[in-house]
Image (cartoon, rainbow, N blue to C red):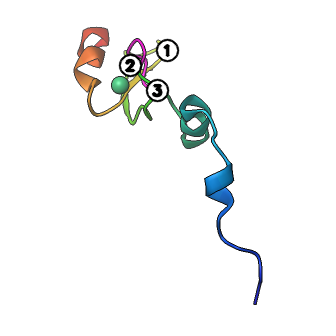
């Protein structure tokens, strides 16, 4: 029973990169700030993360 209007999102404009960081990883493609849901990594190496659109970029790390 709250009278608070559910319009918090309207006044908030978080940077896309900031929001993606909350989700986990940001696409490593230059200029892309989407959520990197696709991880590419060789054993004992740092994983590289890319979004659906740029996941082909990650193939080179495999
Ligand atoms: Zn991307």
Find the magenta span and give its range: 27-31
55 left or right, relative to 9: left
Mark 1 → mark 3, Cα distance in angstroms: 19 Å
Q: Ligand 1 falls in which quarter?
A: top left
33 or 7: nearer the eye? Answer: 7
**Residue of label 1:** 46
- Say if the magenta span includes residue 1: no
Q: Which label belongs to residue 33?
A: 3
40 left or right, relative to 10: left
Q: Is mark 1 within 8 Å of ligand 1?
A: no
From this view, report whether residue 17 is shown above or below residue 6.
above
Q: Is mark 2 within 8 Å of ligand 1?
A: no
Q: Residues within 10 Å of mark 2 (few under 14, many from 20)?
A: some
Q: Which label belongs to residue 41?
A: 2
Residue shown at 65%/65% (left/top)? 7
Residue shown at 54%/36% (left/top)? 20
Mark 2 → mark 3, Cα distance in angstroms: 20 Å
From this view, report whether residue 32 is shown above or below residue 16.
above
Residue 27: image location, x then y, percent: 42, 24
Residue 36: image location, x then y, percent: 42, 31
Q: Of callouts 2 and 3, which one flags the residue occurring earlier in the amino acid sequence?
A: 3
22 left or right, relative to 4: left
Q: Are marks 2 and 1 in contact (CB under 8 Å)?
A: yes
Q: Is mark 3 within 8 Å of ligand 1?
A: yes
């Amino acid at each position: 029973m709250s009278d608070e209007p559910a319009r918090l999102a309207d006044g908030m404009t978080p940077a896309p990169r900031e929001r993606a960081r909350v989700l986990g990883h940001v696409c490593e493609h230059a200029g892309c700030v989407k959520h990197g849901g696709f991880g590419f990594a060789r054993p004992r190496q740092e994983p590289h993360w890319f979004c659906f659109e740029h996941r082909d970029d990650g193939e080179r790390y495999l």
